[in-house]
Image: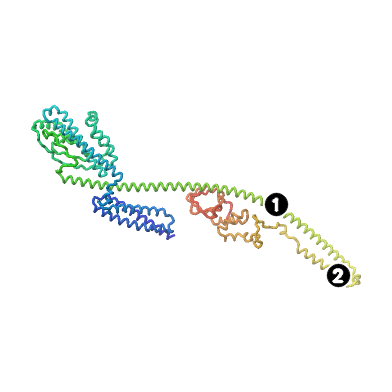
Amino acid sequence: MSNQRKLQTEIDRVIKKVDEGCELFDDIYEKVYSADTQNQKEKYETELKKEIKKLQRLRDQIKSWISGSEVKDKDQLLEYRRLIETKMEAFKVVEKETKTKTFSKEGLARQEKLDPEEQKKADTVNWIGEIIEQMNNMIDEKDLEIEQLSSGKGKKTNKNQIEECNEHLASHKFHVNKLEGIARLVRNDRISAETVDLVKEDLEYYVESHGEDDYMMGYDEEGFYEELGLDDLDVVNVDRVTQASVSSKKKDDDASSATSGSKKEKNSKKSSTASSMIPLTIGRAKVSKKGSISSNEATPTKIGRASSSTASSSTGPAPVAPAPTPKAPAAPAGGGASMAAVLKRESEERQKAALQAQQQEQARQAELLRQQQLKQQQEAQRLQQQQEVLRQQQQQAAQAEALKRQQAQQLLEQQRQQQAVQQDAAAKQKLLQQQATRQQAQAQQQNVLNVGLSGLSLGNAVGSNAPSAISSGPSQLAGGKDATERYLSALNDSFMQIPTGADNERQKSYTPRNPYPCPSCYPSAPSPIFDNPAVFEKLGTDALFFIFYYAQGTHQQYLAAKELKKQSWRYHKKYMTWFQRHEEPTVTTDEYEQGTYIYFDYETGWGQRIKQDFRFEYSFLEDSLSV
């Protein structure tokens, strides 16, 4: 027993090490695929190799236990062995990817083969690039249209058209900035490709119908990208500051300055600065929680419109310079701040990736725990159903056995009655024979006595006639003496054979219940020793049970039951078997007690079995037998 306990302790210790090793393996596995450089990836791959070596040693130990016969329940060991083999397969993939060169055949073939998620992401990025290209073309068209409307004598008459074009131009630039940020978020796996599909139809409809008045009346720029949840992503804003190129190719500076002045007056409510800095915002600007945005502060949309208006009004005949595209960005004036922001964003992305990996691991563990609990519940239900079926089968078997026993008892009672009738008839016949024999013996004794008395009287007569007897001679005297002695000896013999009180009792004879032809040398009657109660104290429990169940209605059955009761066994009248407490009852009332019991199974297995959570009602307790 101590060796089994020691083995179980060793198994629990190895399983705990396997759990810790797998958790550490998963952490390093995530680091391998989130590494930025090849050196970091190789470093993490070395650590991963150390951990898989430890797990392989634990796997060899588990395999030795599985192949041995010391452990009975091997399901848990098989499960942990499969877990370690799964980690080994994952390490083989990592090792193969690390050893594969970038420009080898396998490396190039692997780059060409993309999984469905990567292909979906690439398609989404390409679609965003196409929309950006279309919007850049529309920006160029609007710039050309503004330049044509602002040139010549129509610059005053086309004032409303120029304002409308500037609004379209600002809206196009707003969408271009947003799409650039969304493309970056998709590449960094911050937004899924399925999420971007929510605005595909709206963007395509915007490209087709932005020039229609009905569409622009219902156009809501603020809620256009609300479905993507950019406010919840905590996007870091990177400001690319460019100096607007101001060129005067036309001679009409006064008109352009007037137009610029009017534009500044109209856009003064939207922007608090009149500088020529054009901010390009990736994502949606975060609103401070300390207070609401004042009238001097502008949203990214308003800044785009104001800056575009300012740039367009300060260029003279060519009022608006083409906006810089993502393919050729201008050199940032504040490069240090931009790089710091980018590094901060990358560090936050790593932290969020680690947090997401931890949350995924926790979710996976929770799912495994839930599955184990569900499995345990199903197993408990299955065991309960099996116990219910077994209980029903036992009840049916007990009822059938009770019916069978009742029939056997009835048959036995009939046999006993027949035997009793036969024994009574035999006893009566024997009694009659004895009476006849006794009467015959009494008659013979009476005859002998009469003869003796007659002899005595003859002797007396001889004595009275002494002179004649003497004269008759000594021969007659000797003959009378011999006859008297014979009579007296016969009388003594009859007194020796006189009946006693024991002759009135019926002679006990053993009749087997199930006669069977056996060798004549076998004992034909039970030994008288079994009538002694002291012998039953020396018998074992199985022998007592055998006598109790196969010597029904005899003195031996009574003695066996009495000895079983001395050994703390109690007879259950409903189930007709013997029960004994295995431990103290958990519930005790005036009507019953409930706990774990040992009962003797005489129907199916002929052995002692344990019954847990059994209710022993006192009404079924046989208590008439005193010990």
State the image coordinates of residue 343 (x, y, percent, origin top left): 21, 47
* Sequence-first tag of 2 and 1: 1
Binning the other alpha carbons within 10 Å of mark 1 as few (below 14), some (14 to 19) or many (20 upward) gives few
Do we see residue 116 in this rendering? yes
- Classify mark 2: helix, strand or loop: helix
Whether residue 393 sits left or right of residue 377 in the image: it is right
State the image coordinates of residue 506 (x, y, percent, origin top left): 70, 56
* Quarter in which the C terminus is drawn: bottom right
Q: Which residue is mark 1?
A: 421
Amino acid on which the number 2 mark rests in the picture:
Gly
State the image coordinates of residue 417 (x, y, percent, origin top left): 67, 51
Q: Residue at x 79, y 58 (%)?
A: 439
Observer-side mark, 2 or 1, equals: 1
Q: Residue at x 29, y 46 (%)?
A: 114
**Colouring used for the render:** rainbow
Q: Which residue is mark 2?
A: 479
Whether residue 371 sits left or right of residue 228 in the image: it is right
